[in-house]
Amino acid sequence: MKKSILLLMLVSLSALTFGQDAKYMAAMEKLVGALDTTTEEAGMVKLNNGFERIAGANPKEWLPLYYQSYCNIMIGMRQADNMKKDEYYDKAESLINKADSLSPDNSEIYVVKSFVTSMKISVDPATRGQKLGMQSAALNGKAIQLNPENPRAVFLRGSGLMYTPAQWGGGIDKAIPVLEDALVKFKSAKYENKIVPHWGEETAKQMLDQCHKQTPETK
């Protein structure tokens, strides 16, 4: 009798866990799918709120925090006021640091750490460029070290080179091969499910096209 009761409890617990996991996956798939096509600020705000609710209901999961951070970066980029930009970037940084505490040494998390740091530079390049530029590069280097095949990490490096003046080690000529490598990695990337990070390919293509347009044609 005791064995039967224990077995019944285990079966019930397994069913409950599976139900919770299925609900989490369904909610995340819906929001991540919408994130793939959302460009307007209002839509990003709505998605951020959705990821926040999922994060609250699933405190051990890093991905909802990761996507919250990403949404805050996207919202910040759409602000005209620099103080507003900083507010969103600070929030994004806090969220991605919390995700890092749940999933240490995660290449995807270090990509967003680097991304938000680089966006902070854009608010005041003259004052922040040198210090935060080194931090962003170090974070991106860590992302590549953790996973050399991560296309987002390589893309971010190429983006950084594109916007860094030649006298500081950047330039279009240095960005092009890195962006090309990122696109190769995007093509060969395999994703275990629909909710893992997979953004960046279209932006990488646009940046590479922009680089080629600014490069004199060779005969």
Image: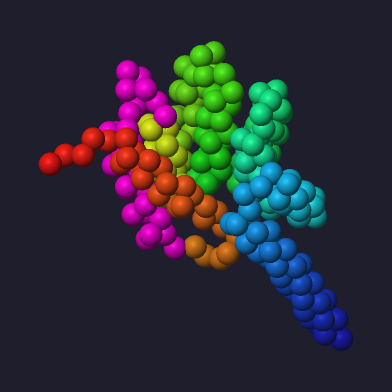
Q: Looking at the picture, does residue 193 appear above or below residue 145? A: below
Observer able to see residue 68: no
Residue at 54% x, 24% y is 121
Residue at 76% x, 72% y is 19
* Image-quadrant location for residue 217: top left
Q: Position of residue 144 (x, y in %)?
A: 41, 42
Q: For the N terminus, give its image quadrant.
A: bottom right
- State which region is magenta: 163-190
Q: Is residue 217 left or right of residue 99?
A: left
Q: Looking at the picture, does residue 54 appear above or below residue 97? A: below
Viewer-closest of 184 and 193:
184
Viewer-closest of 172 and 218:
218
Q: Looking at the picture, does residue 162 appear above or below residue 108? A: above
Q: Looking at the picture, does residue 159 appear above or below residue 187? A: above
Observer able to see residue 217: yes
* Image-quadrant location for residue 178: top left
Residue extending farthest to the top is: 127
Q: Is residue 190 left or right of residue 44?
A: left
Viewer-closest of 35 and 95:
35
Which secondary structure type mostly characterizes the magenta part of the structure?
A: helix
Residue 180 in the magenta stretch? The answer is yes
Question: How many numbered marks are there?
Answer: 0
* Image-quadrant location for residue 155: top left
Residue at 32% x, 47% y is 180
Residue at 41% x, 55% y is 186
Viewer-closest of 172 and 193:
172
Q: Position of residue 62 (x, y in %)?
A: 65, 49
Q: For the C terminus, give its image quadrant.
A: top left
